[in-house]
Amino acid sequence: MVIILIAGNEALARMASTGLGPNMILYLMGSYNLHLATATQILLISSAAGNFTPVVAAFIADSYIGRFLGVGIGSIISFLVILYIHFWFTSFFIPP
């Protein structure tokens, strides 16, 4: 059952990131007045960093801290980052 949930989560995350790409390029070209090649390069570097980070985290978890501690630390860091982004984003909409 857990494998099905993990596979579904990964499939939906890939679909979301694929749909976000063209919109992000248009946003970078419109709001930041970037050239198409520059906007595409920024998106490519961001995607590559996002795909390579789990490899580094897996190496650290397997070599130094252990699998379960690595999953725990990764979950806590992920939660804190999402919390930070949430409060940072909602601070724009709080009336003065």
Image (cartoon, rainbow, N blue to C red):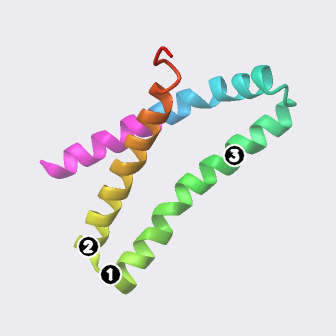
Q: Quadrant of residue 19?
A: top right
Residue drawn at (33%, 49%), measured in percent from left and top? 79
**Secondary structure that dominates the magenta span:** helix
Give the amino acid type for the residue marked by disc 3 in the picture: Leu
Q: Which residues are magenta?
A: 1-15
- Residue holding disc 1: 65
Q: Are marks 1 and 3 in contact (CB under 8 Å)?
A: no
Q: How many marks?
A: 3
Q: Which residue is mark 2?
A: 69
Question: Residue 21 colored magenta?
Answer: no
Q: Is residue 16 left or right of residue 23?
A: left
Percent position (x, y) of residue 40? 76, 38
Q: CA distance from mark 1 to mark 3?
A: 31 Å
Reading the chain from its start, which is encountered first: label 1 or label 3?
3
> Which residue lies most toward the right here?
35
Residue matched to label 3: 44
